[in-house]
Image (spheres, helix red, strand yellow):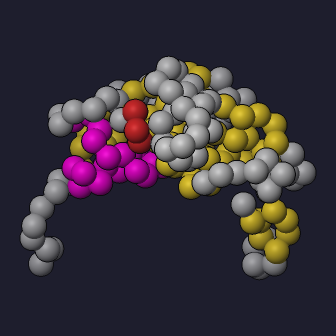
Amino acid sequence: VTVFDLEGKFLRHIGSDAKLIRPTGVAVAADGQRIYVIDTGGVETDKHQLRIFDSQSGELLDTIGKRGTEDGDFNLPLQVTSANDGRVYVVDKGNFRVQGFDAEGQHQLSFGSIGRYPGNFFSPKGISTDPDGNIYVIDTAFGNVQLFNPDGQLLMVIGQRGQSSLP
């Protein structure tokens, strides 16, 4: 992960010593102290992980997960986001769910499952939070954004797959 200042000046690399395999997502904690990196791994490794780095020193603070289905494990994780309250949410694509962790990486909750109904996922890929801690998950198979509260309860579904363009 390459870090630049506000003017675009190179500051440092983070993660090169940790030997990231396939970094696919990055988020910075609201307080700026930690950087969360998703390492997707690949089909031939069990290193499907959330890596936590100190934002100033670049030191690896913790590695969360391995390939699996249990809480805290991942199967092709793709993206990560950090909420204002310190929680971190990971799109666990291959397990068709989102997992939430506290700032130190302790598992707090999981929500979602494979299916075709609101609250289910088929191809979750993107994630973000708003100032109230609500979680927005993009599912490319459904062509929608699903909105969840901080406890993982579905609030609304926006959009659907379609063939027409907007006027």
**Considering depth in this image, is 159 or 131 the residue closer to the camera?**
159
| Residue 11 location (% of width, % of height) | 85, 69
**Picture residue at 39% right of the left edge, 27% below the top:** 111
Q: Residue at x 31, y 29 (%)?
A: 113
- Left or right of 76? Residue 160 is left
- Vertical side of 82 occupied by 6: above or below: below
Q: Name the residue rendered at 85%, 65% in the picture.
A: 12
- Residue visible at 34% across and 30% down in the picture: 112
- Whether residue 2 is situated above or below residue 133 in the rendered picture: below
Residue 113 visible, this orientation: yes
Position of the C terminus, as image quadrant, is bottom left
- Image position, residue 69 (x, y; %): 46, 24
55 inside magenta stretch: no
- Examine the structure image and report whether residue 127 is included in the region drawn in magenta: yes
- Asked if residue 59 lies left or right of residue 132, the reply is right
Residue lying farthest to the right in this orientation:
57
> Can residue 132 be seen in this snapshot?
no
Percent coordinates x, y for residue 28 in the rendering: 68, 50
Answer with left or right where residue 167 lies relative to residue 159: left
Point out residue 60 in the picture as x, y percentages from the top left corner: 82, 42
Write down the region rendered in magenta. Answer: 118-143
Q: Quadrant of the N terminus?
A: bottom right
Hey, which quadrant is residue 117 in on the image? top left
Residue at the extreme left: 164
